[in-house]
Amino acid sequence: MNRLKIVNGKIITPYRMLNRHVLLAENGIITAIEPENTSCGPCQIIDAEGKYIAPGFIDMHTHGAGGHDFMDGTVAAFLGAAEMHARHGTTTLLPTTLTSSQEELRHTLSVFREASAKNTCGSHMQGMHLEGPYFSKNQLGAQDPKFIHDPDPAEYEPITRESKDIIRWSAAPELKGAMEFGRFMRMNGILPSIAHTDAIYEEVMEAFENGFTHMTHLYSAMSGVSRRNAFRFAGVIESAFLIEEMTVEIIADGVHLPQSLLQLIYKSKGAGKIALITDSMRAAGMPEGTSILGSLKAGQTVLIEDGVAKMPDRKAFAGSVATADRLVRTMVQLAGVNLPEAIQMMTATPAKICGIFSQKGSLTIGKQADMVIFDQDIHITKTIIKGNIIYEE
């Protein structure tokens, strides 16, 4: 029996922060959080050295890290990105695709399954997030326009039958066939998410009623207030605030969203409706300089500087290079959010959105022993997955 005892730390539970307590786990499952004099018998003891003990971070939108992109289509890319994310506190992630051909998408899904079976040193890959190809042509961002089109059941139905690893699928709700797409996804246990869209409030409300209860990277590649025939209409951004039950995700790197917008979103939605995401590309965790956005085969050259990826002419961002620890640090130090709520946005909230909160997302008895230990600057010193130390400084 594999027993673990973590001592001498500040344990962040869903309810409070505990000092002078220990966390116990057996066979990868949390069994108790008890006063510090509790004995566990023969067990591995980890001294947190006065640092914080939090649930493992959950990144529900990432394209890669450590010089790897999931669209590279290799097992090595999946494993390499997962290993880099684990070094920054992520214990669970959703590898995310870019818009591509159907053949490339199917290949990526098959590689995910192979890589998951071989993953022993990186973040657990819970399932796939498909981003596109059902997007507005006016809100493409870095997506390849030649693959963009309306939702087609002749495409998405076979893919969901072939792969049971898809957890979420991002699409624009104003497109023809989007409501049928949303209903089909929900009926098959997949979260349809609003993304890369020019929708107005009325279209978002209808989408919400048809299963689109989440928004992909709020403020990025989506409409705000617009005019049609001289009349003003609320866009997707305003809809996020108007629809109380809508959950959102934000790239909290301090660059994609400045302090004022981070504070606005937090004030309006609260920690229970906000998930922090990296939306990271291959350059996450790597030195500044040039990199490739997308796959090595078909991607484009970008410039990494000022903590973000930029197009070579520096006129627009080209992607995020954030890691999960940076997101938490930004929310605490820049946005002024208290640590427990910043942790909630990186753990419990994404777990609930992804439907895995019964297994992970909080330090609660009966859940997986996925944990991170970090100091007051959110500097990660240990990453633990199912009771095993995956990364140690």
Image: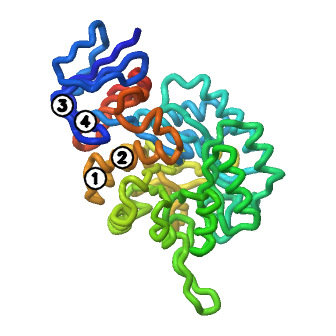
First of labels 4, 1 by sequence position:
4
Residue 205 in picture, x, y percent from top left: 58, 69
Separation of marks 4 and 1 at Cα, in angstroms: 14 Å
* Direction bottom: furthest residue: 230
Which residue in the protein does label 3 denote? 50
First of labels 3, 2 by sequence position:
3
Q: Point out which mark residue 332 bears.
A: 1
Dots 3, 1 in contact, CB < 8 A: no
First of labels 3, 1 by sequence position:
3
Q: Is residue 331 left or right of residue 297?
A: left
Q: Point out which mark residue 270 bears.
A: none
Which residue in the protein does label 2 denote? 344
Dots 4, 2 in contact, CB < 8 A: no
Separation of marks 3 and 4 at Cα, in angstroms: 7 Å
Q: Which quarter shows the N terminus?
A: top left
Q: Is residue 105 left or right of residue 247?
A: right
The kind of residue tagged 2 is Gln
Helix or strand or loop: what does disc 3 sit on? loop
Helix or strand or loop: what does disc 4 sit on? strand
Callout 4 crowding tier (Cα within 10 Å): few <14, some 14–19, many ≥20: many
